[in-house]
Image: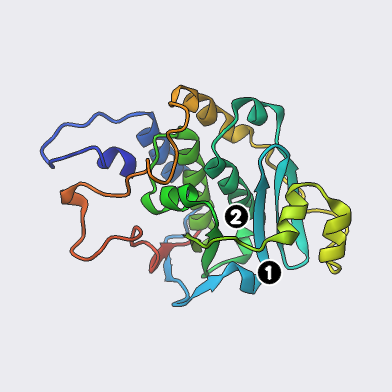
């Protein structure tokens, strides 16, 4: 919805509802039957994921993974993902999405501060908009699970993230992982997803020009009529959230 709204220069301009807009409506259609009719305030303080021993990582040609306390998951990239060669921002958001699927029910009321050393990932998340349909679909699904679990999250840039444990999981370096995480569970968390729910939108992104998704190519500005009086940083739905 925001992506379509960004294209309007004036409030009296006509806009046609596209596939992505209807996908957002469908997301709300799925969520509303789960909503109990109440809304709650989130914790006033942002919680760095490191305080929860929560780390995620993606290895370009291998897979992705994450760890939260002693629980962990990992996933090898399916063949269709490797064939489509998605941008690094897409790869890095996948384990964040899977972490929300696996552990989101335990994060009720939290504001989670994720970190990434990739500027494009951070820029896409701040704008909640991208010409890449695959990225829009992941963002949509992350916020569906956030609404369902009554938590919110943001991603900030930090150079050179020290992420050895999650790095070893995403690279399937299990001996290294066991050396770094002695208390981790023997078996990974079961994953209900093999990312097929993301395949259609990623295929639709094939027509995007190569190399367009860089930190310099992502304009985080908004039309004048969408601007708030103070500096815009993130959509202001962090303080007040619906809970399922």
The residue indicated by pointer 2 is 100
Expressed as whole percent of the image width and height from the top left, the position of residue 78 reads 71, 32
- Which residue of the protein is positioned furthest toward the top in this rendering? 207
SS at mark 2?
A: helix
The quadrant of the image that shows the N terminus is: top left
Instruction: Name the image colouring.
Output: rainbow
The image shows residue 133, relative to residue 116, as above or below, that is above
Expressed as whole percent of the image width and height from the top left, the position of residue 165 reads 75, 60
- Which residue of the protein is positioned furthest toward the bottom in this rendering? 44
Closest to the observer: 95 or 171? 171
Residue density around tag 1, few if under 14, some if 14–19, many if 20 or more, within 10 Å: few
Q: In this view, does 2 lie to the left or right of 169?
A: left
> Which residue corresponds to the image point at 87% horizontal and 61% vertical from the top-left?
178
- Answer whether labels 2 and 1 touch (C-beta < 8 Å): no
> Which residue corresponds to the image point at 52% horizontal and 51% vertical from the top-left?
118
The residue indicated by pointer 1 is 53
Quarter of the image holding residue 84?
top right
Expressed as whole percent of the image width and height from the top left, the position of residue 182 reads 86, 68
């Amino acid at each position: 919805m925001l992506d379509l709204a960004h294209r309007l220069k004036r409030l009296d301009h006509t806009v046609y509802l596209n596939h992505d807009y209807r996908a957002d409506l469908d997301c709300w259609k799925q969520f509303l039957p789960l909503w109990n009719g109440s809304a709650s305030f989130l914790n006033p303080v942002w919680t760095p994921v490191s305080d929860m021993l929560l780390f995620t990582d993606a290895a370009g040609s291998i897979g992705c993974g994450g760890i939260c306390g002693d629980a962990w998951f990992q996933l090898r990239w399916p063949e269709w993902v490797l064939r489509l060669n998605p941008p690094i921002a897409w790869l890095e958001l996948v384990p964040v999405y899977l972490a929300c699927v696996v552990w989101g029910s335990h994060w009720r009321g939290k504001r989670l501060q994720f970190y990434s050393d990739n500027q494009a990932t951070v820029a896409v998340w701040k704008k909640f908009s991208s010409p890449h349909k695959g990225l829009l679909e992941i963002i949509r699904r992350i916020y569906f699970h956030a609404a369902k679990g009554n938590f919110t999250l943001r991603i900030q840039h930090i150079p050179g993230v020290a992420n050895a444990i999650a790095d070893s999981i995403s690279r399937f370096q299990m001996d290294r992982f066991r050396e770094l995480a002695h208390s981790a569970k023997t078996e990974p968390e079961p994953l209900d997803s093999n990312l097929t729910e993301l395949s259609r939108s990623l295929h639709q992104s094939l027509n995007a020009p190569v190399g367009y998704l860089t930190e310099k190519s992502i304009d985080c500005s908004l039309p004048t009529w969408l601007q708030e009086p103070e500096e815009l940083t993130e959509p202001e739905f962090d303080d007040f959230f619906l809970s399922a």
